[in-house]
Amino acid sequence: MSEAELKEFAKQLRKPEGEFGLQVGERMRKGNVHMYAVALEALHISAGDNILEIGMGNGFFVKDILDVHPSIAYSGCDYSELMVEESVKLNSNFVTSNRAHFFNTTADKLPFKNESFNKIFTINTLYFWDDYTAVLNEIKRVLKPGGKLVIAIRPKSLMQYYPFVKYGFKMFSPEEVTALLIENNFFVKNTIEKQEPEQDINGEKVKMSTLIIVAEK
């Protein structure tokens, strides 16, 4: 990719828009298969959960949450209006049955009452938060006491291989995510790094992994 193409791709990863945004949404869905599996395992989904996902993309994985038990409720927020529209289309049965709700909003302005959710998770959004304290304060506000927060990202050691990250991405090591959460009064319970199949990045084979940080309010 040229520098202009890399810059546009990075912009679309942050906020998919238009026809290219649909393609990026599908590309994220394919690239996040392993990350979702690890994140949902760490979330320990069970009957009666009220779950919030920040940045659900096109909503492909919502069924993996709601199929666990009919008593589970799900809300998804995304910065991209296009991704909200795609999520509603893809999960129309869950929307109709009032089990899934989707919102176009930023992570620092969550449209929910205090202590609404017992579990919150987010995958590959941490890089884009403009004000980490504001976002984490919002998460604390809508999370029940003792509620669980699961953050999934690619660690800095691997993210640096992607050429588009120089355009608007903030990268984190496991220690940096842990410190950020502690600074914002979360209790970090566990750090997990799971290996994934290697990826070909600019002709180089890179051993990939998912970093999961599990915290509690």
Image: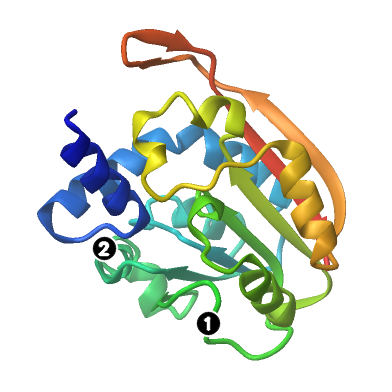
Left or right: residue 59 versus residue 89 is right
Query: Which disc, if any, is residue 109?
Result: 1
> Can you give x and y, in whole percent of width and height, for residue 160 in the image?
49, 28
**Which residue in the protein does label 2 denote?**
86
- How packed is label 1: few (under 14 Cα within 10 Å), some, or many (20 or more)? few
Residue type pointed to by label 1: Lys
Residue type pointed to by label 2: Glu
Q: Which tag is nearer the camera, tag 1 or tag 2?
A: 1
Q: Secondary structure at mark 1?
A: loop
Mark 1 and mark 2 lie on one chain; the one further toward the N terminus is 2
Position of 193 relative to 170 (above/below): above
| Res. 184 image quadrant | bottom right
| Res. 172 image quadrant | top right
> Can you give x and y, in whole percent of width and height, for residue 73 in the image?
58, 72
The residue that appears at 25% across and 37% down in the rendered structure is 6
Residue 48 in view (yes/no): no
Which residue ends up furthest to the left in the rendered image? Answer: 19
